[in-house]
Image: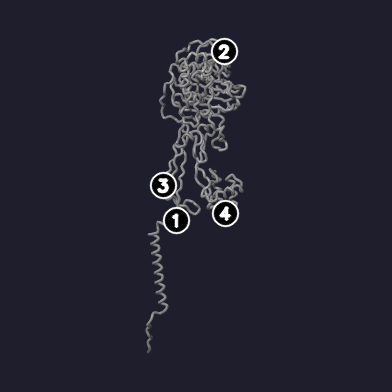
Amino acid sequence: MSHARKPTSIPLGRGRYYVLMVTLATAFLGLFARAAYLQVDESKVLHGKADSRSVRNKKIVTHRGVITDRNGIELAVSVPVKSVWVDMTKVMEKSPLLSEDGWNRLAVIADKKPKQFKQWMVKRKGRRFAWVARHLDPKTASLIKTLDLPGVYLQNEFRRYYPSAEITAHLVGFTDVDDKGREGLEKSYNDLLSGESGQEKVRLDLQRRVIEQEEVIKVAEKGLDLKLSIDSRIQAIAYKALKTAVLKHKARSGALVMLDVDSGEVLALISQPSYNPNRFDSRYPRFTRNSAFVDSYEPGSTAKPFTVASALESGVVSPSSKINTSPGRYRLNGYWVKDSRNHGLLNVSGVLQKSSNVGVSKLAQMMTNEEFLRTFYQVGFGVDTASGFPGESAGRMNFRDNWSAIEKANVSFGYGFMVTPVQLAQAYAVLGAYGVKRPLSLIRNTGVPQGEQVLSRKVSKQVINMMETVVAKGGTGTKAKVFGYRIAGKTGTARKAEAGSYGDQYTVFFAGIAPVSDPKIAMVVFVNEPNSEEYYAGDVAAPVFAKVAEEALRLLNVKPDQKENYAVNVKAAGDGNG
């Protein structure tokens, strides 16, 4: 029996097997070594390259603080919106011809014609960021998503919204498209309201959508809230009453300012014509101009109480002193000072009641210049109120050292110097506070601010009592009467200076205090260039005061102080110069 011979070498198939195994093992070892190298030695480099493509620092948008009235009613709030922007580098990579129909639809959203829009896009070639449209409504923002255009993205922003619109427009102001304050208190307190944006590190996908929030680098800080001194209820009443008067008398403009006598706070401030701050297309300068703060005018007869106050303070007269105004005119330096008629012999109170130019001119001549002007400066004429409102005017009180007697007389009845409606309101608030001047505030006070006694308490009360006769029968301001309340006030009708002389246009004021027994509010109503048959302050401005004061006193729960029930006399006295 024969036996098979034992092979003396490794079969060829088995040799290949070993070679393959060695090769595979070497390859795996190489891969392992490479992986270990990449994971250990090159990990930072690779992570850096990956992060440079997908990780970005993203701004955390914060919103402005809320502006409210004194009772917490919102006057300005920020609402979230979407804005659309393009990365032109990405656009040119994916859609260099801009031929897709979606670009035409995007042009409509950008408020451009398709051809114009494409030219606009090409000009921005190479830019990584360019705004297309800001502050889109939700429906339009959803449409952007459906277009699915390369390099087109949405971004979260906030838009300012003003619930009271025209009613508080001039005081609150507005912000621009970048949410920066541009007018009013939005501008004055921009830094406080703005807050600070935050920053976070996020990872993006190819469509630049956030897929992971890695860390917050800086926490966003919301803007601080601002509580104003105004009462929205009174503001709305004042807005309606002033607007009605401006339209009725075809006036060029108007203003109304109401102050809290006890605190110096502004309870209402209106300027006409107004505008809607929610609409960019209504923000024209002639509408956004706040006449109450930035425009100054000759106050006319509303300055006469301060001439009387100066005379009483200096001791040249007492309330019962007699002033002879006959024959209704008074010659100074070759010029005539005239009354509307001969009022004859008047006491000091009668000079105010009849609004006698002759009477106050004679009072002014009894005093030295320093005595005469002291009250005018003490109540705040010639300097701004330090309210912080942007563009506030200081008026004009520039007098020559050697001024003439007629110039002095002119100042006594409100010509030759200029004040803003706000300055005039503060001056009357000083009288209402019995000579105490408090800082004017547009922000609600937490307490009663310390005031300065600039006029004597006795003289202030005397002047208030005299001004009450202006609203009584025979005075020039009977239409300012308020049922149930004693009112003190003064009318002022002044010709406007034009090209170095006085023309046929008028400015009219009514300034008043209520109630007389315990003053709580001081209010100034101003109407510029009324063009109706009625153009005297007693007919144009006084009724506005009555309407607003009546509602305001009720809303403020001020106790009536008029014991005698009388009907409001709807016919002004008509005599005098007020």
| Badge 2 vs badge 4, beta-carbon distance below 8 Å | no
Q: Hey, which quadrant is residue 95 in on the image?
A: bottom right
Does residue 554 appear anywhere in the picture? no
Q: Which residue is mark 4?
A: 96
Counting residues from the N terminus, which is met first, the one under dot 3 or under dot 4? 4
Q: CA distance from mark 3 to mark 1?
A: 20 Å
Circles 2 and 1, Cβ within 8 Å, touching? The answer is no
Residue at image location 56% in from the left, 22% down from the top: 508
- Residue drawn at x 52%, y 45% as measured from the top left: 82
- Dot 2 or dot 4, earlier in sequence: 4
Label 4 – label 1 distance at C-alpha: 27 Å
The residue beneath circle 2 is 329
Badge 2 amino acid? Arg
| The C terminus sits in image quarter | top right
Q: Nearer the viewer, residue 140 or 207?
A: 207
Q: Which numbered disc flags the more N-terminal residue, 2 or 1?
A: 1
Q: What kind of residue is marked 4?
A: Pro
The earlier-in-sequence mark between 4 and 1 is 1
Find residue 441 and report its horizontal and vertical position in percent. Answer: 45, 28
For mark 4, give the secondary structure.
Answer: loop
Q: What is the secondary structure assignment of the residue under circle 3?
A: strand
Direction from residue 502 to residue 1 in the image, left or right: left
Q: Which mark is residue 217?
A: 3
Amino acid type, mark 3: Ile
Q: CA distance from mark 2 to mark 3?
A: 79 Å
* Residue count near mark 3 (Cα–Cα under 10 Å), binned few <14, some 14–19, many ≥20: some
Label 2 and label 4: CA atoms lie apart by: 85 Å
User: Can residue 132 be seen at all in this image of the molecule?
Assistant: yes
- Residue at numbered disc 1: 50
